[in-house]
Amino acid sequence: MPMLQPSKKNGFLGGGDGRVLDLDTAVKDGVLGGVGAGGLGTGVVEKLDLNKMIEELNLSEVPSVFICPISLEPMTDPVTLCTGQTYEKSNILKWLGMGHYTCPTTMQELWDDMLTPNKTLYQLICTWFSQQYVQMKKRSEDAQGRTSELLTILKKVKGQARIQTLKELHQLVDNHSTARTAVVDEGGVTVLTSLLGPFTSYAVGSEVIAILVNLTLCSDSKANLMQPSKVSSVIDVLNEGSIDAKLNCVRLIEILMDDKGFRAESLSSHSLLVALMRLIRDKRHPNGHLPGLALLKSVSIHNELQSLILNIGAAPQLVELIPFLNPECIELTLFTLDALSSTSQGKQALKDCPKTIPTMVKLLMRISEICTGHALSILLSVCKLAPEECSLVAVEAGLAAKLLLVIQSGCRQILKQQAAELLKLCSLNYSDTMFISKCKLTRTIQ
Amino acid sequence: MGSVCCTQQHRRADSDEIEQTAEIEDRIERESKAEEHIQKLLLLGSSDSGKSTIFKQIKLLFQNGFDDAELKNYIPVIHANIYQTIKILFDGSKELSQSFSDRSRFHVSDENKEIGERLSEIGSRLEFPYLTSEIADEIETLWQDSAIQETLSCCNKLQVPDCAHYYIENLQRLSNPGYIPTKEDVLYARVQTTGVVEIQFSPVRENKRSGEVYRLFDVGGQRNEKRKWIHLFEGVTAVIFCAAINEYDQTLLENETNRLMETKELFEWVLKQPCFEKTSFMLFLNKFDLFEEKVLKVPLNVCEWFQDYQPASSGKQEIEHAYEFVKKKFEELYFRSTSPDCVDRVFKIYRTNALDQKLVKKTFKLVHETLRRRNLFEAGLL
């Protein structure tokens, strides 16, 4: 039977005769289930704050013996009960404080309420996390060094080599925040931006955009990217790219719009809106709908761009899309249509689409107050354009009953006013009795 | 017995025939399958838009270029261009000296007048003599005359070909007895395309041959030849539409219509053709180098399509600004002329200078990439 030799070497357990493993070796060799080998020499462990390390590392695979059975989180102050089970001190105190006098895992009744600090386990946890931390720091530094190298290479190479460099840079920037800062600090943004232009191939363009999206861009960089030829490159990728590339483009455009110096005319491109509508209507990739609609909403706020949206026939397409969208998307779509309905061209387009009125009527009081508000606003705009014709259609679609619901509901005052206005507008064409019969609530609404 | 022999012979003949027919049908099937894989590109555009130059460039880039015999074939064309140019300029100077108030500008000096008359007479013949050094010297002298230079500056009213400067600069070389045209000389040569010309090629990618095969068609650009294009319209993969953007202040050969308006009309017409519903459109805004030179001197507003143009700055920035404006106009036109269900077709705009081989190569690489991605997309692989 191996004898434990008290040893002052290494500051931890065990000596050097090989029968008892010292802590670092035990962790390094994975005896305790440590993830990833190598790294640290013996004894040189920084006394870093354990909580800080755990939080920063945010690892998903921590050895199970380090996890508190109550919170399922790594323990920072392990204590052991008389049953031999170990818990995080604050958690077990809470448990006992609630009046339970049992061991949570074994369900045994406690014969002793003593909480013994599990020093061994604590030291194991500290060492293990320290190792992981140091490894991560090293990887980050490596990432930073490699990023600098890649940026230098990028300035010189062309063709396939350029594409490979960009791909590697993309990987680094995706995984390491140090890489991201390195790119920004070393003028990488300018280098990347210079790669976008009228002769950018798809392969290069999509990688550059994928990298840029991860970085924090200063105002100057954003202004630089808003140059027409570069915006064209982004729009090209948005038009032709894979779904991931398209999503990156959408994000990048949003980043660029989020700047004080942003001018809407730099985005006044039919191709952009066509590409956006294509993304929104792509049934094969539903994950593109929400980002696409969000960007469309941001675009529709700008007056200069509204006519472009209407020119490509987006209004009827959006109306016809609504039945297939989830509530969040519907809200964005309604916002856009509402914004468009403020122009005369928009009103006309909405009126010309036969599905507008029935769809809007259906949406009243269906999803949310905001949606109802937009639907009301759109209905008002359309019906005011051609009161007789539209109110007929609207009433046939069951508008009257819905409006009554709005008025009687707890919605904001302004919505009730709008509903009342619309009701009055529609009732002008009917005799009283006819109108009241139209107001009869159908069973579903009841 | 004889009859049996006869029937046997018949049967053998029959079976031979059947075999032959089967073989022919087999070949037809194989060739049609091969045809399907050939992607057809159609070069369209109004006259003088640079279609044929692009055609020549593709030949130089992806085929074996021109051999000596083909190069020599261009000598009469080049000489003809020179004669035509100087004739146009001389006749133009005479015309302008009659219609302009300060006629002295356009008065050719007396010695040169004689040369001018002679050259003009040569230029009006159907066949031209070989350009000798003596004639070349005379042309050069005439060219130096201030009146001719003045006429040149008003050249938007005349039909001076764009190759004028280039050929005059190289007159000595071109008039050498043993002259063999260079690639560049051939690219500048201006001859009206009649009928249809086609070449088949495979884009060479970094010294490897990729699998795609393209067949490029070049058609005549003059207005009276458009009907010849019609039977080609079915099934093309892409239309490469060339528009020379420097011609916004020039008029047509046939009448007084502004050239760029003519291009605009043609583009609109082509976009609306039902046979092009699924066709990709590559718009080449060509002659960018000439556009660059012109746009700072002649405002864009002289063309009624661009009358709402506002210059924003000066120098290089202004050139970019003007180019973006023109590009946007074409984009607008495209989307106006495209019905909502055709909006899915590929539409890209490229800035080109058809005489610059490197640029054409880069541009074509991008076109090729786009078409490949489109194919993958349509096959559901993207």
Image (cartoon, helix red, strand yellow):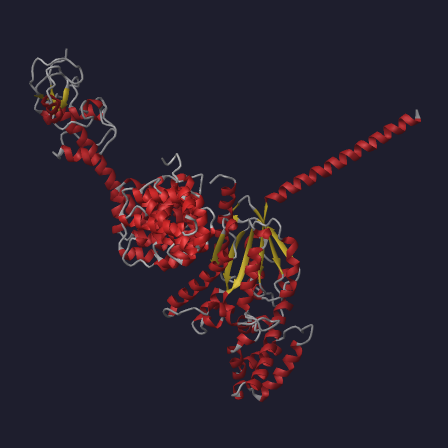
Residue drawn at (52%, 78%), measured in percent from left and top? B154
Q: Is residue B32 above or below residue B60?
A: above
Q: Is residue B183 above or below residue A21?
A: below
In the rendered image, which quarter contains the N terminus of chain B? top right
Residue drawn at (59%, 74%), measured in percent from left and top? B85
Locate residue B109, reporting x and y percent.
Answer: 56, 87
The residue nearer to you, when weighing B173 against B255, is B255
The residue nearer to you, when weighing A431 against B192, is A431
Residue drawn at (30%, 51%), measured in percent from left and top? A188
Residue drawn at (36%, 58%), measured in percent from left and top? A303
User: Is residue A195 among what the camera can see?
Assistant: no
Locate residue A285, reporting x and y percent.
Answer: 42, 39
The residue nearer to you, when weighing B11 against A186, is B11
User: Is residue B123 among what the camera can see?
Assistant: yes
Q: Is residue B246 above or below residue A230?
A: below
Farthest residue to the right: give it.
Answer: B2
Q: Quadrant of residue B51?
A: bottom right
Q: Is residue B82 above or below residue A126?
A: below
Q: Count up the numbered dots.
A: 0
Locate residue A389, reporting x and y percent.
Answer: 46, 52
The residue nearer to you, when weighing A299 against A150, is A299
Q: Quadrant of residue B82?
A: bottom right
Locate residue B60, reporting x and y percent.
Answer: 56, 56
Left or right, B360 with reference to A71:
right
